[in-house]
């Protein structure tokens, strides 16, 4: 297990380019299994979760070639589904929650998918019901083997149907869409997730020959086709990394320019950080954050304390709740952070409290943060990263703190942030990988 040793209290300065979107990559790479033709994907982030998924496709027999930095070609013209019964496949799938995204494409094209209980962050219950209920509506049969902790999904023929999703699950919607594009007839999905990742996936599938309408809304209509063709796709910059850099700049009183952010796909993310008092400017397609000695949390119009809560798109993404929380610890004022989706995601705040942050954990979903207004710096501490986003929040706290901090289990951070130590050191940070 690796660690970061961080010397805090340094101001950063410069430009940083966000990586390709992790959550989009898991969907797009899985979608290459839907065709026997070559698909070229650009702006793929070099992070553990994505690299594991690429390795999984190789095990299945997909021809994967790295063409350049962040650019790969995929061709799934000779897959061997028998490997799904092997120990190597089982081990890799169970270490990666994103492996669930291969189920829809394999079911649609080959009528079978084997899905061991996937791994991923330990942030609370993350059920898969939406995926499998959607497959069943399309005519698939889902069986669960309790001894292997694995699902088998089979279908002689997928048929389009109307479905109202029980939750606007991003991965669930994506999986059902990928299964439905090759189904017989029309599929209507209501309460579909409408994150930019879904927009990107649907637009790519349409370029491959799919017939999807309602893209960008929560009502998708899919006319099934017999086969899909190859295409070239470029992924969005990672909105979670962009939000992380905004919080980092504020916490460390740094002047940072985030390049090529695709503003039109950031939703309310910039506004939420503005509500925390952070100044940021739109400069063409960049975000400029000036160095600020202080930033003050806004109140609601009636004078009540600000609440930041996660919600399905176009609401505030739950992946940035941890970042918003840590950023608020050095603001002026108070804020209620409400994490609605995962009951374990806020448990890392005890480590921030050890560093001197003023936080009251009200219950598993809510925390009140009383900002220190940079008057009392956080203290360096020995930390352990529990998940990707909490790990990044800890790194931000450590970079702003006085003294030395150590963060263990940084593999969690590496799962979602590409070469984060190297890139931040280039701005003036002092992060040593051990």
Image (tube, grey):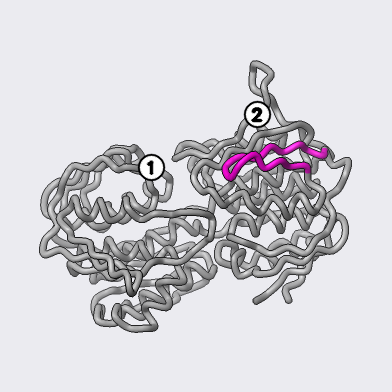
Q: Residue at x 43, y 46 (%)?
A: 196
- Residue located 82% across and 39% down the image: 372
Name the residue nearer the viewer: 77 or 139. 139
Figure check: 134 above or below 105: above
Q: Residue at the location (48% across, 38% down)?
A: 311
Residue 337 location, x and y as percent? Answer: 62, 38
- Mark 1 sits on what residue? 194
The residue wearing badge 2 is 306
Residue 216, magenta (yes or no): no
The quarter of the rendered structure image containing the C terminus is bottom right
Give how far across and how far down residue 41 sits, in percent. Answer: 40, 64
Question: How far from the left and from the top, in percent, is residue 14?
Answer: 74, 54
Q: Which residues are magenta?
A: 358-372
Q: Nearer the N terminus, badge 1 or badge 2?
A: 1
The answer to which quarter of the image holds residue 408 is: bottom right
**Image position, residue 384 (x, y; %):** 69, 64
């Amino acid at each position: 297990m690796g660690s970061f040793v961080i010397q805090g209290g340094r101001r950063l300065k410069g430009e940083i380019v966000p990586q390709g979107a992790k959550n989009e990559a898991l969907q797009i790479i899985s979608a290459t299994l839907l065709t026997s033709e070559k698909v070229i994907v650009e702006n793929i982030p070099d992070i553990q979760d994505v690299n594991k998924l690429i390795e999984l496709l190789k095990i299945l027999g997909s021809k994967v070639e790295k063409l350049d930095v962040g650019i790969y070609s995929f061709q799934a013209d000779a897959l061997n589904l028998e490997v799904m019964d092997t120990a190597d496949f089982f081990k890799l799938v169970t270490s990666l929650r994103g492996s669930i995204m291969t189920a829809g494409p394999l079911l649609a094209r080959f009528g079978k998918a084997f899905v061991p209980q996937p791994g991923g962050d330990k942030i609370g219950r993350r059920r898969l019901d939406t995926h499998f209920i959607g497959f069943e509506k399309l005519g698939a049969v889902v069986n669960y083997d309790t001894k292997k902790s694995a699902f088998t999904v089979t279908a002689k023929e997928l048929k389009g149907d109307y479905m109202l999703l029980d939750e606007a699950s991003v991965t669930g919607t994506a999986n059902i869409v990928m299964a439905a594009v090759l189904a017989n007839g029309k599929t209507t999905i209501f309460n579909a997730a409408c994150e930019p990742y879904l927009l990107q996936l649907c637009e790519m599938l349409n370029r491959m020959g799919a017939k999807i309408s309602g893209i960008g809304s929560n009502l998708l209509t899919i006319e099934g086709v017999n086969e899909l063709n190859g295409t070239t796709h470029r992924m969005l910059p990672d909105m979670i990394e962009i939000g992380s850099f905004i919080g980092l700049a504020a916490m460390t009183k740094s002047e940072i320019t985030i390049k090529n952010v695709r503003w039109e796909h950031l939703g309310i993310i910039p506004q939420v950080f503005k509500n925390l008092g952070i100044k940021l400017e739109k400069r063409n397609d960049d975000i400029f954050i000036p160095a600020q000695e202080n930033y003050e949390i806004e109140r609601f119009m009636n004078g009540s304390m600000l609440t930041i809560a996660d919600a399905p798109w176009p609401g505030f993404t739950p992946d940035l709740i941890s970042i918003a929380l840590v950023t608020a610890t050095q603001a002026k004022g108070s804020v209620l952070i409400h994490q609605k989706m995962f009951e374990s995601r806020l448990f890392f705040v005890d480590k921030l409290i050890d560093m001197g942050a003023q936080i009251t954990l009200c219950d598993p979903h809510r925390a009140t943060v009383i900002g220190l207004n940079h008057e009392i710096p956080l203290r360096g501490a020995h930390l352990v990263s529990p998940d990707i986003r909490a790990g990044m929040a800890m790194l931000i706290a450590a970079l702003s703190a006085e003294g030395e901090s150590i963060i263990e289990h940084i593999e969690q951070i590496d799962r979602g942030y590409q070469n984060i130590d190297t890139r931040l050191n280039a701005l003036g940070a002092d992060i040593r990988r051990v």
